[in-house]
Amino acid sequence: MNAYVDKNHKVRMMCLGHPLLEDPSPKAIGNYVAILPDYNEQVYQQIQEFLEKIEYTGFANFDMKYDPRDGSYKLFEINLRQGRSSFYVTLNGYNLTRYLVDDRIYNEAFTETVYGKGTKLWLGVPKKVLLKYVNPSFKEEIRRFVSSGNYGTTLFYSKDNSPKRYLLMKYAFHRYIGAFKTYFHK
């Protein structure tokens, strides 16, 4: 869950994603490498109420897990910044930085809370790595996103695509194949 809370402690935007896979490398454990869009009004309301009650301001990035024993979400932490995988939010049409700029630079008044409804799968690894290592129950859904072109990544940006950078990013992406072979444990 990513959110932006303005200078008057009003949540301007929230966007929920379902992490599918984490980086298994020892130096990057816990960093998400694939996120599916998700939407849950109850979670949005609970997090919004919490942030506004404590008079929070700024970016908020929550790590949480669903507990099937009681049907609730358990919060692990709140990061007071955008996360490594927070581009997931911008990819889905909710530019986190835009909310900050509108609030702090342009002093735009709060009008409503935007509750993100994503339509794109975010990838931080090659598709074949995701499909090989993800929980099999998600494979069909992932294939639908990929076949319809509803996916994206942080690394490959057409306006920043010199041949040297492209090769470097391809190399970085390719290294995940070895990292998962070496470190992934089910």
Image: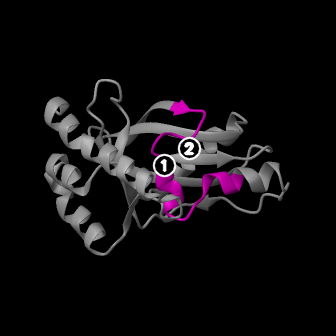
Residue behind mark 1: 43
Q: Position of residue 4 (x, y in %)?
A: 65, 47
Q: Position of residue 170 (x, y in %)?
A: 32, 51
Position of 126 with respect to 16 (left or right) is left
Label 2: element kind: helix
**Residue 97 forms part of the magenta stretch:** yes
Marks counted in the figure total 2
Q: Position of residue 179 (x, y in %)?
A: 22, 35
Examine the image and state in which quarter residue 29 appears.
top left
Position of 125 with respect to 60 (left or right) is left
Classify 10 Å Cα crowding around label 1: few (below 14), some (14-19), many (20 and above): some
**Magenta stretch, residue numbers:** 78-99
Residue at position x 85%, y 54% from top? 107
The amino acid sitting under disc 2 is Ile
Which disc is residue 47 wearing? 2
Residue found at the far top of this picture:
26
**Residue 158 forms part of the magenta stretch:** no
Residue at position x 18%, y 34% from top? 184
**What distance separates the C-alpha of mark 2 from that of mark 1?**
6 Å
The amino acid sitting under disc 1 is Val
Residue contact at pointers 2 and 1, CB within 8 angstroms? yes
